[in-house]
Image (cartoon, helix red, strand yellow):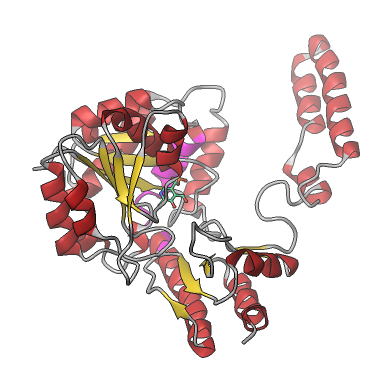
Amino acid sequence: MAYDISRRFLLAGATGLGVAGATACASGASAIAETTEAAFPPEKVAVENPYLLGPPEGVALLSRNENPYGPAPSALKMIEYAASKGAFYASQDAVLLLKTMIAEKNGVAPEQVALTTGSGEALSAIAMIYGPNGPIVAPRLFWDTTALYAANLGMATIDRVPLKADMTTDLEGIEAKVTTETGLVQLCNPNNPTGLVADAATLKAAVKRMASKTMVLVDEAYMELADDPEGNTCIGLIKDHPNVIVSRTFSKIYGMAGIRMGYTISSPEVAQKIQATAMSWSPCTSYAAAIGSYNDEAFLAYSKAKVKEAREMITATLDTLGLEYLPSQTNFVFFKSGKAANDVQKAFAEQKISVRGQYMDYVDWTRVSTGKIEDVERFCKALPAIVGA
Ligand SMILES: Cc1ncc(COP(=O)(O)O)c(C=O)c1O
């Protein structure tokens, strides 16, 4: 397996550390140098296990909605600096600086921002805070990992509302279920795995009405990739509707899925609850990378252009094959292959191309992420034979 670390590699590392440890008692500086040498320097990883992190050898990783063009050079520079300060917990100055940057960009106060180790941590916290108050009402198909996390702990139940015939979120259906006994409404915009953006005016009106009865969470993990993020975001509603929470992440357009930083914007009271319920302290490298690249407009524009280019390659191929797909505004496309999704996944895997398997009872729908252009090219070349076109 490509991820296997060879026994030789492990033994070499372990023995070396032992020797260096003993030497360390004898002489300080040279011992540190030896420890460094015996450890896992990047050059060694590159030679002996170049795929320790990132996609395995030759694999086109198109299943996880990452941005392979990240992290931005502006983030990498800051990670290098942060790594040298890795002995220390992230400082309150770094926390405040990132909160302030996010607040300034979004026209809110820093106290309205909660920072977590990826947005998933905030979303899990939210499910655990509000799940015990009543059902989490959500579309049938959405990114449900964190609602399920609370459900698996016995802290929430999920009340799923079927999608409309065009696979958009049924906001009317969701609203019809919402009462003051509802624990949380959870929406995902753009939605995952459909990639669809809700009609802005309809969504905002529904969110306002529902927020007069209960908490409403809008997961905007992919919003920066949408055609008109400013017009579609629900962040502007928070000022007059303190029950609204919006989550965002550095994992998608910022290309930092492995670095881990996410945030929510809400009322200060809710932000405090989320921050207090989050279970970890984010690494200093995460803060540094986020601070370094948050306002890197050139990198964001570059990433968005690459996503669009790849998405258009995918949809052009689907058009040629006459396959149905949803008009995505994200870095993934949900399409109807007409074949069992798990078989499609296996057939791609045989060619070292990774796509998602079946969602619920959407038997013949496949989700493919955009990725490096050359990887998307491989997907487009392989698709006709796999779907038998
Ligand atoms: C819609 C949505 N929200 C949130 C997340 C969580 O991402 P992260 O914890 O990396 O911020 C994901 C991950 O794929 C997602 O698709």
Compared with 154, 325 (above or below) is below
Asked whether the viewer can see residue 145, the reply is yes
| Residue at the image point whose x is 66% and y is 78% from the top | 386
Q: Which residue does the image show at 91% across and 38% down from the upper left?
A: 8
Instruction: Answer above or below: position of 260 versus 251.
Output: above
User: Magenta segment: does it hold 46?
Assistant: no
Q: Give the range drawn in magenta.
A: 285-299
Q: Report x, y in % for residue 49.
A: 79, 48
Rendering quarter of residue 154: top left
364, 323: nearer the viewer: 364
Q: Which residue lies furthest to the top in this view?
A: 25
Residue 1 location (% of width, % of height):
81, 51
Q: Which of 149 and 77 is in front in this view?
A: 149
Determine whether, in the image, residue 58 is placed left or right of residue 130.
Answer: right
Left or right, 122 with respect to 353, comes to left
* Front-most of residues 187 and 286: 187
The location of residue 383, given as percent across then percent down, is: 62, 79
Q: Position of residue 361 (x, y in %)?
A: 49, 60
Relative to 385, does residue 163 appear above or below in the rendering? above
Q: Say which residue appears at 36% left-offset and 42% top-offset.
A: 158
